[in-house]
Image (cartoon, rainbow, N blue to C red):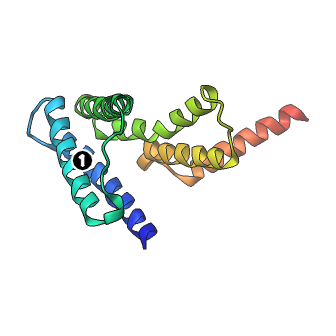
């Protein structure tokens, strides 16, 4: 079914993105971030073309007007090319793990901009998603130092201090 294919494609996309970050960090091949981004986008374009020809309902369509071409070019340059180049630079400069952690915070930025700039409503679903993302980032940052006893002790200490303060 189409939803199963979609879920599978999302999982493959996530896996290839993770592999890409690790390979960029561990590779002994040195090339400019712009050149690496070009090759990555070329491979992505070829995959999208192959995918679009496999199903007749998913063929590619050209933008219908000059204004649509303008917006398509900006959409390709700013959130795609620019972000990939800067991500490659970040992996080279600070490493794969900090870059991945900062990348995990991207949805939080999108929610904040959506709510504050575009007036979108902040729903319970968004709040739960933010809590899950922050929890995952916290677990990654804490890594091997994460022990439930330490967290339990910290919560107990906070509750005791708060209870004493209020009584």
- Image coordinates of residue 67 in percent, x first then y, are 38, 28
Q: Position of residue 63 (x, y in %)?
A: 34, 39
Above or below residue 150? Residue 56 is: below
Residue 34 picture quarter: top left
What's the residue at 42%, 69% (across, down)? 2
Looking at the image, which residue sits at the far front?
Answer: 65
Of residue 83 and residue 102, the one placed in the foreground of this image is 83
Characterize the local packing of mark 1: few (<14), some (14-19) or many (20 or more) Cα atoms within 10 angstroms: some
Left or right: 23 in relation to 111: left
Q: Position of residue 113 (x, y in %)?
A: 56, 29
- Please state, as top left, top right, bottom left or bottom right, where the C terminus lies in the image: top right
Q: Can see residue 144?
A: yes
Query: As rendered, which of 86 and 50 lies closer to the eye?
Result: 50
Q: Residue furthest bottom?
A: 1
Q: Looking at the image, can residue 105 be seen? A: no
Q: Which residue is mark 1?
A: 20
Relative to 1, say whether 116 is above or below: above
Q: Residue furthest right?
A: 167
Q: Residue at 37% across / 65% down in the picture?
A: 8
């Amino acid at each position: 079914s189409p939803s199963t294919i979609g879920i599978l494609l999302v999982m493959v996309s996530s896996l290839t993105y993770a592999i890409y970050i690790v390979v960029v960090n561990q590779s002994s091949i040195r090339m400019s971030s712009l050149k690496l981004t070009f090759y990555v986008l070329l491979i992505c374009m070829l995959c999208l073309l192959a995918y679009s020809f496999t199903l007749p309902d998913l063929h590619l369509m050209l933008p219908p007007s000059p204004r649509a071409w303008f917006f398509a070019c900006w959409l390709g340059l700013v959130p795609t090319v620019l972000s990939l180049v800067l991500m490659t630079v970040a992996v080279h400069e600070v490493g794969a793990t900090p870059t991945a952690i900062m990348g995990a915070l991207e949805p939080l930025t999108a929610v904040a901009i959506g709510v504050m700039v575009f007036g979108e409503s902040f729903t319970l679903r968004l709040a739960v998603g933010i809590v899950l993302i922050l929890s995952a980032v916290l677990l990654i940052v804490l890594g091997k130092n994460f022990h439930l006893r330490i967290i339990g002790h910290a919560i107990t200490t906070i509750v005791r201090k708060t209870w004493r303060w209020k009584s």
